[in-house]
Image (cartoon, grey):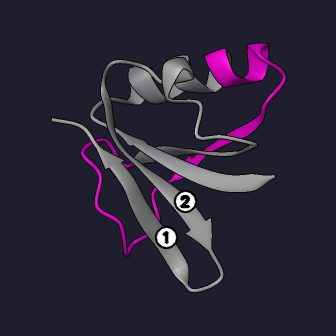
Amino acid sequence: MTDYLATFHTHLAALKTHRSLSAAGIAARMAPVPRKISSSCGTCVFYSAEEPCFDRLDTDTEAVYRMEDSGAVLMKEYE
Protein backbone atom coordinates (compact mmCIF):
# COMPACT_ATOMS: atom_id res chain seq x y z
CA MET A 1 0.00 0.00 0.00
CA THR A 2 1.26 3.46 -0.89
CA ASP A 3 0.19 6.73 0.72
CA TYR A 4 -0.86 9.62 -1.54
CA LEU A 5 -1.90 13.22 -1.07
CA ALA A 6 -4.12 15.06 -3.57
CA THR A 7 -4.60 18.84 -3.58
CA PHE A 8 -7.47 20.71 -5.18
CA HIS A 9 -8.52 24.06 -6.59
CA THR A 10 -11.78 23.97 -4.58
CA HIS A 11 -13.03 22.48 -1.32
CA LEU A 12 -15.93 20.85 -3.22
CA ALA A 13 -13.45 18.95 -5.43
CA ALA A 14 -11.72 17.61 -2.30
CA LEU A 15 -15.07 16.50 -0.88
CA LYS A 16 -16.10 14.78 -4.14
CA THR A 17 -12.75 12.97 -4.33
CA HIS A 18 -13.00 11.84 -0.71
CA ARG A 19 -16.47 10.42 -1.39
CA SER A 20 -15.35 8.71 -4.60
CA LEU A 21 -12.34 7.06 -2.96
CA SER A 22 -14.36 5.99 0.09
CA ALA A 23 -17.09 4.52 -2.12
CA ALA A 24 -14.43 2.38 -3.81
CA GLY A 25 -13.28 1.06 -0.43
CA ILE A 26 -10.09 3.14 -0.38
CA ALA A 27 -9.05 4.54 3.01
CA ALA A 28 -9.16 8.34 2.63
CA ARG A 29 -9.33 11.40 4.87
CA MET A 30 -9.64 15.12 4.27
CA ALA A 31 -7.17 17.42 6.00
CA PRO A 32 -5.52 20.84 5.75
CA VAL A 33 -2.71 20.92 3.17
CA PRO A 34 0.74 20.64 4.81
CA ARG A 35 2.63 23.96 4.86
CA LYS A 36 5.39 22.69 2.56
CA ILE A 37 2.86 22.11 -0.23
CA SER A 38 0.78 24.98 -1.56
CA SER A 39 -2.83 24.54 -2.60
CA SER A 40 -5.56 26.79 -3.90
CA CYS A 41 -8.28 25.80 -1.44
CA GLY A 42 -6.14 24.64 1.49
CA THR A 43 -7.85 21.23 1.70
CA CYS A 44 -6.28 17.95 0.64
CA VAL A 45 -7.15 14.27 0.67
CA PHE A 46 -4.72 11.71 2.07
CA TYR A 47 -5.37 8.17 0.85
CA SER A 48 -3.71 4.73 0.79
CA ALA A 49 -3.98 2.54 -2.30
CA GLU A 50 -2.04 0.15 -4.53
CA GLU A 51 -1.99 2.78 -7.32
CA PRO A 52 -2.63 6.56 -7.47
CA CYS A 53 -6.30 6.08 -8.58
CA PHE A 54 -6.22 9.05 -10.97
CA ASP A 55 -9.60 7.98 -12.37
CA ARG A 56 -11.22 8.49 -8.92
CA LEU A 57 -10.02 12.10 -8.55
CA ASP A 58 -12.28 15.06 -9.28
CA THR A 59 -11.61 17.07 -12.45
CA ASP A 60 -10.65 20.07 -10.29
CA THR A 61 -7.61 18.29 -8.83
CA GLU A 62 -4.50 20.46 -8.57
CA ALA A 63 -1.74 17.85 -7.96
CA VAL A 64 -1.07 14.34 -6.64
CA TYR A 65 1.90 13.49 -4.42
CA ARG A 66 3.32 10.13 -3.31
CA MET A 67 4.19 10.30 0.39
CA GLU A 68 7.64 8.98 1.31
CA ASP A 69 9.75 9.07 4.46
CA SER A 70 11.76 11.94 2.95
CA GLY A 71 8.58 13.93 2.17
CA ALA A 72 6.06 14.37 -0.61
CA VAL A 73 7.08 13.54 -4.19
CA LEU A 74 5.08 15.21 -6.96
CA MET A 75 3.60 12.57 -9.27
CA LYS A 76 1.18 14.51 -11.45
CA GLU A 77 0.28 18.17 -11.74
CA TYR A 78 -2.92 19.34 -13.39
CA GLU A 79 -3.55 22.66 -15.12
The residue at 42%/19% (across/down) is 58
| Residues at discs 2 and 1 in contact (Cβ within 8 Å) | yes
The image's mark for residue 57 is none
Give the camera-side residue of 51 and 77: 51
Q: Is residue 31 above or below residue 17?
A: below
Tag count in the figure?
2
Q: Which residue is mark 1?
A: 72
Q: Position of residue 43 (x, y in %)?
A: 44, 44
Left or right, residue 59 beside residue 34? left
Q: Quadrant of the C terminus?
A: top left
54 is higher (above) or lower (below) than 44: above
Magenta highlight range? 20-42
Residue furthest front in the image: 51
Q: Position of residue 78 (x, y in %)?
A: 24, 37
Q: Secondary structure at mark 2?
A: strand
Check if residue 26 falls in the magenta segment. Answer: yes
Whole-percent x, y for residue 71 in the image: 53, 79
Mark 2 closeness class: few <14, some 14–19, many ≥20 residues within 10 Å: many
Q: Quadrant of residue 74?
A: bottom left
Q: Residue at x 45, y 57 (%)?
A: 33
Q: Amino acid at mark 2?
A: Arg
Earlier along the polypeptide chain: callout 2 or callout 1? 2
Q: Which residue is mark 2?
A: 66
Q: Secondary structure at mark 1?
A: strand
Q: CA distance from mark 2 to mark 1?
A: 6 Å
Q: Position of residue 60 (x, y in %)?
A: 30, 24
Q: Identity of the amino acid at label 1?
A: Ala
Crowding near pointer 1: few (<14 within 10 Å), some, many (20+)? some
